[in-house]
Amino acid sequence: FCKSLMNSIFPPELRFAFLKLSNRVFKLFSTFCYFDITEIDGVNTNELYNAVQLYLSSSVSIAGNRLSLTRAVNSSSITFGLSNNDSIVDTYNSVTVVWEHIVTQRQTQTFAWRPMPEEKRGFTLRIKKKDKNLVLDSYLEYIMERANEIRRTNQDRLLYTNSRGGSLDSRGLPWESVPFKHPSTFDTLAMDPVKKQQIMDDLTDFAQCQSFYQKTGRAWKRGYLLYGPPGTGKSSMIAAMANHLRYDIYDLELTEVKSNSELRKLLMKTSSKSIIVIEDIDCSINLTNRNKKQSNETETGFVEGSGDGSTITLSGLLNFTDGLWSCCGSERIFVFTTNHIDKLDPALLRSGRMDMHVHMSYCTFPSIKILLRNYLGYEEGDLNDDVLKEMEEVVDKAEITPADVSEALIKNRRDKDRAVRELLEDLRSRAKRNEKNGSLEEQEKMALDSPYAEANGGGEEEEIEDIICKSSDDY
Ligand SMILES: Nc1ncnc2c1ncn2[C@@H]1O[C@H](COP(=O)(O)OP(=O)(O)OP(=O)(O)O)[C@@H](O)[C@H]1O
Ligand SMILES: [Mg+2]
């Protein structure tokens, strides 16, 4: 009616001007203001659009009559969405806002840098003018946070690796990912229960105490060093940590990293709420004394590499975990593992870098009981007291890894009595052997100290170090 009235009153050349004017008058007297959040901002994807979509999915599922349903790649759950041109009311801090999902057809383009979707999608947020500051101050921030939370709980977590070397994928990322489905949890992990509880509390504390880190001026990150013989559960512990906190894992293959700057770039492309893992850190690069490396750097003008074209250094690694760049994201955990803690530079071990040193030891009596429960379903009272007593007596002397116990139990899991009998025999014979030859640690030490070992390995390292020092002196 208004339109036909306007057409009959105004000549065509004045109509546009009148429309513009009436729009302005309307805006002046309207108590609302509007925010448009389009799916694509210029040529880039608008992160806020995705966040709003996810955020609304949690309230839409209850309120909406007509919903769109999606299931993303790598996701085990279905998300609800607002249908085209539908709206929903949301309340935040007692302020009511209205979200509308607007979908229109995109005009066909003759030329585009990249193909655009056929539909132009966006959300419009309607809010009272007096509440405008609330949106700008905290509502949008809150939406981003909630969306991240929803994404994390809906989506399977990912295991990233940099095994492609320095090359980037089609989205410019140096990491490749697969869904992370490792079943290890703190419940299945065989270790001293007190130590286990300490680690779990430490992790929970870390995840919940953002304000503490803010208040004390510390970057919101924590380092764990897991050390111990092979097969004692270091990798299983990392999986259990990730499952406990629901974090992604970045498994950093240090030997694939060519330089310190590449290491920094990898770090920059990790997301928050993640665990960054370097396994077998003593074997990854030549982490010798930092001062020696630095003197090489200053005197020669470049960093002495390890001979295979890689120029990554200990100080590069230290900066990675602790320098200014290490806090370019937040809520991150660094986990390093090693079989030989004594080979690591003390600079790497200091608090602030590696806050917690966790010794993954050979099986103790409590950990054997956990494995018997996990693999055979035996609870505390199910086993014969004499068997338990003997196990308790010999297990420490036997120095058996949880991996070996697991294997023995898996092998005979259909015949539980046999499984326990064979395990006990194995424990006895290992204990007897160790009593005769000394503990495994002592045996290993003796093997390394022997003249044969010197010639084949132990001495070689020192020789190479000597050569590096000499050559830098020559310079
Ligand atoms: N503490 C443990 N609790 C439960 N299972 C364990 C434990 N330790 C080892 N295992 C079992 O042994 C297998 C190997 O363990 P894992 O890979 O975690 O050892 P690791 O300490 O990382 O060894 P490596 O030093 O060789 O990398 C696991 O798949 C798991 O089944
Ligand atoms: Mg491992």
Image (tube, rainbow, N blue to C red):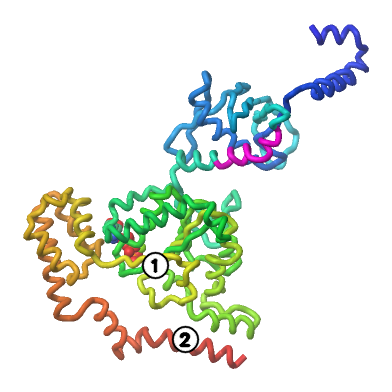
Under mark 1, the amino acid is His
**Label placed on residue 357:** 1
Q: Nearer the viewer, mark 2 or mark 1?
A: 1
Q: Residues within 10 Å of mark 2 (few under 14, many from 20)?
A: few
Residue at (90% x, 21% y) in the render: 17
Structural distance between the alpha carbons of marks 2 and 1: 29 Å
Residue 188, compared with residue 228, is above or below; it is above
Among the 4 quarters of the image, the one containing residue 279? bottom left
**Viewer-closest of 265 and 199:** 199
Q: Considering depth in this image, is 54 or 159 the residue closer to the camera?
A: 54
In the picture, the disc for residue 464 is: 2
- Relative image position of residue 333 (x, y in whole percent): 47, 58
Q: Residue at point 36% right, 53% down?
A: 240
- Residue 97 image position (x, y, % from top left): 63, 27
Q: Please give the count of numbered marks on the rendered protein.
A: 2
- Describe residue 98's horizontal placement relative to residue 161 as left or right: right
Query: Is residue 208 part of the magenta span, yes or no?
Result: no
The label shown at residue 143 is none
The secondary element bearing badge 1 is classed as strand
Residue 451 versus residue 288: which sits nearer the camera? 288
Q: Quadrant of the C terminus?
A: bottom right
Pick whichever, 252 or 106, lies toward us.
Answer: 252
Q: Quadrant of ligand 1?
A: bottom left
Q: Secondary structure at mark 2?
A: helix
Is label 2's Cβ within 8 Å of ligand 1? no
The prevailing secondary structure element of the residues shown in magenta is helix
Nearer-N-terminus badge (2/1): 1
Segment colored magenta: 132-145
* Quarter occupied by residue 49: top right
Q: Residue at x 24, y 76 (%)?
A: 440
